[in-house]
Amino acid sequence: MSKLLVASVLCLLVATGARAAPTANKASAAKPAPAADAPLVSTSPIATIDGQTIPYSEIERAIGAQVRQAEAEYLTKAYDLRRGALDQLITNRLLEGEARKAGKTVAEWLDQEFLAKVPEPTEDELRKAYEKNRAQLEGATFEQVKDRLREHLRRLEAKRRFQARLQELMTKHGVKTFLVAPEPVRFAVEAAGPSRGAEKAKVTIVEFSDFQCPYCGRVSPTLARVLADYQGKVRLFYRQFPLGFHPLAQKAAEASLCANDQWKFWELHDRMFADQSKLEVADLKAAARTLGLDGAKFDACLDGGSKAAAVEADLRAGQAVGVQGTPALFVNGVFINGAAPYEQVKAVVERELERG
């Protein structure tokens, strides 16, 4: 056999996981592997080495939570794709029917029924829109963006009217859907640590976060907005998960807990995320004094490392439910990975509120 052929065979084995053929020996004969379609339980043999069995429980201990997260994300994504396709199919059928009755194409019908009938926004409405979006307009004057704002407001109003009409058509034609959303996978995450929001809220969000993580900085205002929009209905718990490649994250985590001893956790939390360039120990001590903490007590707490164990406990709790990066959110135990946009978090919160 040529060297090239041998190399090819070896590559194929690596690529396919090099599944070994079962060996006939007493150990394997005494404890046969389960059938391919049999459910795996903790004691199910999943491999053998030198006749010694590796049970399924070892895989579960190592990456069980990560696997469940991946399964949950897959099920959710698959449902969202099907739901989107179904909604589009229903919309197309309804619009085609209305356009056919009017003797027009769908595009012509939409233009006539919506865009053509939307009134021009007033000068006052245009100026309010300008002020509301000034930060995103990069210094442009009102006159420079006036026409763009006019078109934007008209399209928003057309969209609002379209959605209302679509709902009417769905009711008129008795639209019913039978696509069932998958039951969300829930993780048993302890709601521990500093919190804000209503104590008896129906929705609890546990956040594992890192003060040096830029993505955590992005999700912080999102969560603040959720708390404001669902006041009395949502409670947020912050848990520490400093990543090893962020050299300032560990001490920042400890500092937040030192501040918590003086009832100033959220003040320091907000300050650190507002400016993540100032997380050196000297910066943290200066911030503590600016926020009115007892400087001597704060310094002793931070320098003495008395909060390191609490940070480690949070880290291990996160790892136990499969957290590998930050931010990681658990909304009533439902996992949301990364710096999710407001609409994504809102959708999960509203679903949980509906479930009661």
Image (cartoon, grey):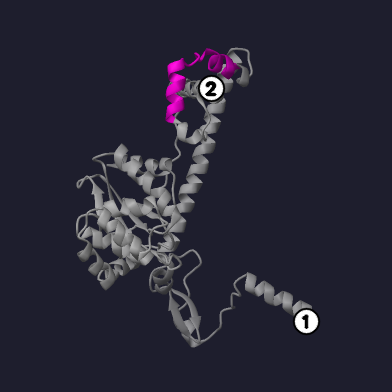
Q: SS of the residue at dot 1? A: helix
Front label number (1 vs 2): 2
Q: Is residue 232 visible?
A: yes
The chief SS type of the magenta part is helix
Q: Is residue 335 above or below residue 245?
A: above
Identify residue for label 2: 143
Residue 334 visible in the snapshot: no
How many marks the image carries: the answer is 2
Q: Residue at x 62, y 21 (%)?
A: 107
Percent x, y for residue 233? 26, 41
Q: Secondary structure at mark 2?
A: helix
Q: Per the image, is 278 magenta?
A: no
Residue 186 in the image: x percent, y percent? 35, 54
Please identify the quadrant where the C terminus is shown: top left
Q: Gap in Å between the C-alphas at discs 1 and 2?
A: 74 Å
Please tell me whether residue 112 belongs to the stretch shown in magenta.
Answer: yes
Judge left or right: residue 321 versus residue 98: left
Which residues make up the magenta segment? 109-132
Q: Find residue 82 and report its horizontal and vertical position in percent.
A: 52, 41
Quarter of the image holding residue 88?
A: top right
Is residue 349 or residue 101 the one in the foreground?
349
Inspect the image, locate mark 2, and give the three-letter code of the amino acid beneath it: Glu
Within 10 Å of disc 1 (Cα), the crowding (few <14, some 14-19, many 20+) is few
Query: Which disc number belongs to residue 3?
Result: 1
Mark earlier in primary sequence (1, 2) = 1
Residue at 42%, 71% (x, y): give it.
62
Residue 254, numbered circle: none
Circles 1, 2 touching at the beta carbon (< 8 Å)? no
The kind of residue tagged 1 is: Lys
The correct choice, above or below, for 241 with respect to 200 in the image is: below
Residue closer to the observer: 146 or 96: 146
